[in-house]
Image (cartoon, rainbow, N blue to C red):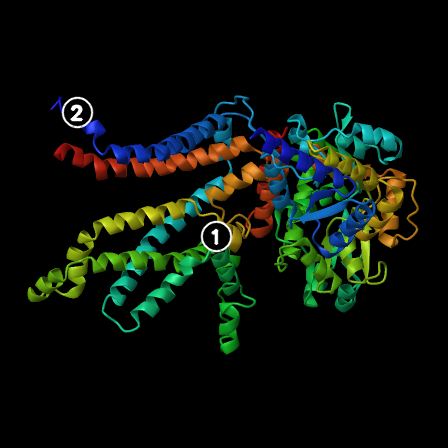
């Protein structure tokens, strides 16, 4: 065993050499930048970074700020709903398209199109659609239902769901395409076998096909979750954080603190908290996912 | 390599020399509404007349513009000149040595003697050195009232805030929005600060923002202002516009009774062809306590290595305070000039009121001069929330306000 070790290191030498620039960049930019940000989150940096140590002051202020608490709450609501709904909608759409329907290409393209649009465009389009003056509410009232009210973006309690609708509209297409690719990867023999055994289609999907699509689900999960954590442009374009501060999100708090309040320290503290939150979710998951395999080798 | 390098250098030197008299100077500002754009065009015209070229880089919205300006300065890509609200916003940029010391220009042009009130130049001065050129005086403390809205409601045009507030039911009955207000934090907190400055004695305003005295901020006097703000919130409940000039437009067209906004609203009335005293009235200090805060705009000049650009900067700085530019710019913008020795007989009713207050010395410092951007924006957030959510009581908002003042420096 011990004699084999050096050989292991030099195996696939070309690949390892090729990966060096990326490894160096990742270490320097990501790890270095992260460490720098965390260090400066303990300082009283204003418009420019300043090494003026204040300990945990920035964090105390952060967790005493109502706007930050609302931002965290909004991210939790948006994230959870987005995660569940985008998977459900995306998978159902994929399963429907997988029924060998006509015009599959056309339908697939139409559903994927919103993903080609930036969040800024998505946000503006849905801002107009949800605007009571000339959006859905106006159209329904025009048809004759005079008392119809639908103005989520103007009602603080549900404004975040107005944003969610836009996010789902934009994101579902991508999930559908990934799921469809996963479904196409399932061997036809599996379906035939299930049919012969008399298993209903929905049971086949839930107990056989979905477990077999695990890698696709994990890829999609990573894409969707990173999209949720960094949601910023959608909010800025659609609501600007309003009405009031009802749709604030952490990323927008960080931006506003750094570039509007000229308070880098506070922005760094907030972004460090975002990192900690992500780490708390990702690290246990990564250990579960990849940690187990080592012992089997 | 060396020869090619020196040839290139010689080439650029030649190009530089031939352009010495026509330098392109990029000027950044956030003057994009109708009246503002007309005003900044006066500067551009005057600067182009000197043989240089004014390259206009306007970014809508002060908050967005400031973010871009600061990131360009700190990122090492400075523009030729930029507009800022003077005061504490630029403090750190000056400390970091990013801004040009223009004391020599100020002395040559005699700004020390002619800038009136002298506090404007003080706000540009750090450790005895001048870093910015004040171009106008803006005051926040105005109530703009639409005559046609009050005629429709069958009520006399009010002469102060109490009468205005009393007429809100009649206005609402006539299908009007009593108070127009844009849904942006700076407008909402601005209206609150106007109430504090106008409905209470000056000592309270100075105590809260100048001394950061939490006893005064949490006291009974300030509580009355929060009550007034809660009343204003009800009056503005139907005002869903975002931008201040859209809100002003509601007043111009008679859809809203009035708006609390700085004197820059004057420019919008002028562009729309409304006549002061006939179509609309302006009430300084909300008609209750005529006093103006002397905030305003100033131009700062980043440190540049290029000597041609630096020369153009100096020309622009001197030009901004010349009598002719001051008159044409301020007439278009509706603001007051920074020098008292020029003829403004062309100014309308509202500007004359402002000039009279300026002469009488009924002045207050602006919040931006007293508080850091951090504090100002925290207050903006508080009022964004307060005005959007009628379930927040005046007392709760005041408690949060006291916390912000306690943290301020």
In the image, residue B182 sits, relative to residue A92, either above or below, namely above
Q: Whole-percent x and y of residue B362?
A: 85, 39
Q: Which residue is pictured at 32% across the width and 46% down the height?
A: A222
Q: Which mark is on residue A5? A: 2
Q: Is residue B39 left or right of residue B368?
A: right
> What residue is shown with label 1?
A234
Name the quadrant containing residue B370: top right
Q: Are marks 1 and 2 in contact (CB under 8 Å)?
A: no
Q: Which residue is pictured at 23% across the width and 48% down the height?
A: A215
Name the quadrant containing residue A293: top left
Element type at mark 2: helix
Circle 1 marks a residue in which chain?
A
For label 1, the crowd category at 10 Å Cα-Cα, with few meaning under 14, some 14 to 19 and many 20 or more, is many
| Mark 1 or mark 2, earlier in chain | 2
- Mark 1 and mark 2 on one chain: yes
Q: Whole-percent x and y of residue B323?
A: 89, 43
Q: Nearer the viewer, residue A153 or B345?
A: B345
- Whether residue B15 is visible: yes
Element type at mark 1: helix
* In the image, farthest residue toward the bottom: A144
Q: Which residue is pictured at 74% across the width and 59% down the height?
A: B167
Q: Whole-percent x and y of residue B380?
A: 61, 43
Circle 2 marks a residue in which chain?
A
Q: Which of B291 and B155 is in front in this view?
A: B291
Report the Cα–Cα distance between label 1 and label 2. Answer: 50 Å
Q: Whole-percent x and y of residue A50?
A: 56, 25
Name the quadrant containing residue B117: top right
Q: Which quadrant is the N terminus of chain A positioned in?
A: top left
- Whether residue B85 is visible: no
């Amino acid at each position: 065993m011990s004699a084999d070790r050096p050989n292991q290191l030099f195996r696939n030498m070309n690949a390892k050499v090729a990966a060096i620039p990326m490894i160096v960049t990742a270490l320097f930019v990501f790890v270095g930048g992260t460490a720098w940000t965390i260090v400066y989150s303990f300082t009283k940096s204003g418009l420019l970074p300043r090494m003026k140590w204040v300990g945990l002051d920035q964090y105390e202020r952060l967790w005493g700020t109502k706007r930050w608490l609302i931002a965290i709450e909004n991210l939790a609501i948006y994230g959870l709903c987005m995660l569940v709904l985008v998977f459900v909608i995306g998978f159902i759409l994929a399963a429907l398209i997988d029924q060998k329907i006509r015009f599959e290409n056309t339908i697939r393209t139409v559903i994927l199109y919103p993903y080609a649009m930036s969040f800024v465009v998505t946000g503006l389009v849905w801002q107009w659609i949800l605007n009571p003056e000339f959006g859905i509410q106006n159209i329904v009232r025009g048809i004759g239902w005079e008392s119809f009210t639908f103005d989520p973006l103007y009602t603080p309690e549900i404004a975040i769901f107005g944003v969610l609708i836009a996010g789902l509209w934009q994101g579902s297409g991508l999930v559908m395409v990934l799921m469809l690719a996963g479904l196409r990867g399932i061997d036809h023999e599996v379906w035939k076998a299930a049919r012969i055994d008399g298993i209903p289609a929905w049971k086949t999907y839930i107990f056989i096909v979905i477990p077999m699509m695990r890698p696709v689900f994990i890829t999609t999960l990573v894409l969707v979750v990173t999209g949720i954590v960094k949601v910023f442009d959608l909010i800025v374009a659609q609501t600007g954080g309003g009405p009031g501060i009802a749709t604030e999100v952490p990323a927008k708090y960080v931006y506003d603190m750094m570039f509007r309040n000229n308070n880098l320290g506070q922005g760094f503290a907030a972004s460090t908290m975002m990192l900690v939150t992500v780490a708390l979710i990702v690290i246990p998951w990564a250990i579960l996912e990849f940690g187990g395999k080592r012992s089997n080798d | 390599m060396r020869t090619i390098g020196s040839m290139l250098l010689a080439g650029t030197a030649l190009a530089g020399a031939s352009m010495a008299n026509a330098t392109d100077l990029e000027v950044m500002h956030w003057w994009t509404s109708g009246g503002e754009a007309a005003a900044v065009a006066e500067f551009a015209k005057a600067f182009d007349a000197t043989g240089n070229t004014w390259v206009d880089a306007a970014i809508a919205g002060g908050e967005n513009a400031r973010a871009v300006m600061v990131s360009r300065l700190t990122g090492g890509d400075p523009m030729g000149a930029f507009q800022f609200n003077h005061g504490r916003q630029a403090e750190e940029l000056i400390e970091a040595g990013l801004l040009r010391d223009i004391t020599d220009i100020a002395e040559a042009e005699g700004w020390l003697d002619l800038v009136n009130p002298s506090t404007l130049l003080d706000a540009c001065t750090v450790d005895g050195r001048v870093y910015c050129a004040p171009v106008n005086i803006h005051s926040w403390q105005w109530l703009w009232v639409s005559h046609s809205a009050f005629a429709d409601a069958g009520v006399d045009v009010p002469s102060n805030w109490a009468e205005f507030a009393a007429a809100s039911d009649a206005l609402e009955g006539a299908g009007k929005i009593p108070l127009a207000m844009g849904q942006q934090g700076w407008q909402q907190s601005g209206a609150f600060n106007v109430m504090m400055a106008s409905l209470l004695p000056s000592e309270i305003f100075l105590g809260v923002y100048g001394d950061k005295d939490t006893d005064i901020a949490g006291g009974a006097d300030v509580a009355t202002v929060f009550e007034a703000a809660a009343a204003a919130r009800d009056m503005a409940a139907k005002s869903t516009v975002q931008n201040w000039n859209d809100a002003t437009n509601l007043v111009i067209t008679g859809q809203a009774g009035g708006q609390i906004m700085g004197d820059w609203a004057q420019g919008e009335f002028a562009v729309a062809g409304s006549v002061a005293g006939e179509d609309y009235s302006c009430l300084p200090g909300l008609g209750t306590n005529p006093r103006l805060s002397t905030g305003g705009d100033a131009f700062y000049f980043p440190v540049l290595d290029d000597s041609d650009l630096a020369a153009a900067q100096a020309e622009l700085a001197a030009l901004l305070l010349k009598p002719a530019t001051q008159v044409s710019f301020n007439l278009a913008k509706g603001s007051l000039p920074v020098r008292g020795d020029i003829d403004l007989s062309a100014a309308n009713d509202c500007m004359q009121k402002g000039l009279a207050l300026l002469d009488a010395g009924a002045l207050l410092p602006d919040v931006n001069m007293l508080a850091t951007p951090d504090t100002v924006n925290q207050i903006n957030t508080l009022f964004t929330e307060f005005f959007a959510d009628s379930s927040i009581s005046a007392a709760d908002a005041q408690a949060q306000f006291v916390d912000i003042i306690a943290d301020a420096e």
